[in-house]
Every structure is written in structure tokens, then in C-alpha cells.
Image (tube, grey):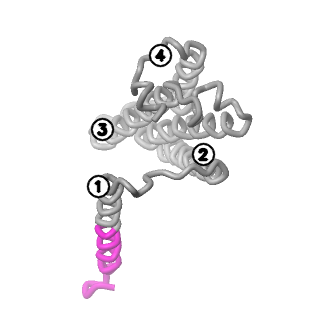
Amino acid sequence: MSSDGGASRRPYASVDLGLALLALALVALTSVVVVATDVLSATVNDRFDITIVTAATLVSGSVAALDWARGRVAHDPAALLRSSAFAVLALLNGLTLVVGMVGADAALGATLEDPGQLPLVAAVVARGVAAALLVIAGWVSLSRGVPSLRPGLVLVGPATAVLVILVLAASVQDALPRLAPQEMLDA
């Protein structure tokens, strides 16, 4: 407790220090990977990848559910928009997980042996929509006029739109724009 009886601000200093040290460690690690040519920047482990994607799916789905509940109970449109952004990320992670589990990754260009543009397009579209929703949520939380939103539509609408775009993109894989040259993907 502080001298005036309020909560002490001391715990936040350690969190700030920890975040600063983490940022420095990440910068150092990134520098080593970029500068040293003999350091591997990636390892391939399918079982570990499935574990990470499963955890990401569960976390993004849980955050979407918690923010949606908060938005419904507190009538907070920013929380509803955040829930929609995390629902889009949960959709992307869930689709990635299902594709990997059923073995459809080769047909969709998501393997190292035969890489394609679809995984890049899917990541750009879904993460772009999620980022836009998070920016809009920030804008809504800072604005004075609070819009009235339909919670179900806000949650399901963007995720459904992303799903439709990804299904259409999967059906026309050969016509997708080249986000990365095929030579780079093959390397």
C-alpha cells in the first residue's frame, strides 16, 4: 500500500522492466538470425506445430467468447468488435488445424514440398480483417458517440465473410495473386 492508503504502484515497475528485457532479447535474437548465416531461423516439427495451432485456436476462441460476453453484458461495442477480431483469428487457426489434421495441406499448398499462395492469402486476409476490427474497436472506445451494434451479427459477420473469401480463394488457387514469388517459396 502507498502512504495515502491506495494500492502501491511498485508491481508495475517490474512488469515494465520484464517487457523491456523481453523486447531487448527478441531484438538480439532477431539480429543473430538475420546476421549469422549458419543459424537456422526455423525448425519443422509437425507435432509441435499442431500443438501451437491448437493452443492458438483455444486462446483466440476463448478471448472472443469473453469479449463477446463483456460486450453483451456491459453494452460495450468495442468489446464486441474485439470479440469479432478474435473470432476471425480463431477461424483462421481452426481452419489451419483442420487442414493439417486431415492431411489436406498438400492440396492447399501448405507443405514445404509444394508451397502455394493460398496460405499467404489466407493469412493476409484473415489477419488484415482482424487488425481492422481491432483498430475500429480502439476508435469506438475512444469516441464519444457509442454506436449500437447487433452482437450476433458483429461476432459472426466478419468471420463468415473471411470464410467465404477463403473458400473462394481455395477454389481458384491458380488464379490467386502472387504475394511471394514461387522461387522464394520453393527455397
Q: Amino acid at mark 3?
A: Trp
Identify the residue under disc 1: 35
Q: CA distance from mark 3 to mark 1?
A: 39 Å
Identify the residue under disc 4: 176
Give the vertical position of 181 relative to 11 (above or below).
above
Residue 83 percent coordinates (x, y): 50, 41
Which quadrant: the N terminus?
bottom left
Residue 176 within the segment the image draws in magenta: no
In the structure shown, which secondary structural element does the residue marked by tag 2 occupy? Answer: helix
Q: Identify the mark nearer the N-term, 1 or 4.
A: 1
Residue 15 within the segment the image draws in magenta: yes
Whether residue 62 is visible, yes or no, is no
Residue at (66, 34) in percent of width and height: 99
Identify the residue under disc 3: 139
**Mark 3 near mark 2, Cβ–Cβ under 8 Å?**
no
Of circles 3 and 1, which is in front? Answer: 1
In the structure shown, which secondary structural element does the residue marked by tag 3 occupy? Answer: helix
In the structure shown, which secondary structural element does the residue marked by tag 1 occupy? Answer: helix
- Is residue 89 left or right of 54 when viewed as pictured? left
Of circles 1 and 4, which is in front? Answer: 1
Q: Identify the mark nearer the N-term, 2 or 1.
A: 1
- Is residue 96 left or right of 177 when viewed as pictured? right
Residue 80 percent coordinates (x, y): 47, 39
Of circles 4 and 2, which is in front? Answer: 4
Identify the residue under disc 2: 57
In this view, which residue lies farthest toward the bottom? Answer: 3
Give the vertical position of 183 relative to 29 (above or below).
above
Residue at (31, 52) in percent of width and height: 34
Q: Identify the mark nearer the N-term, 3 or 4.
A: 3
Give the vertical position of 44 relative to 114 (above or below).
below
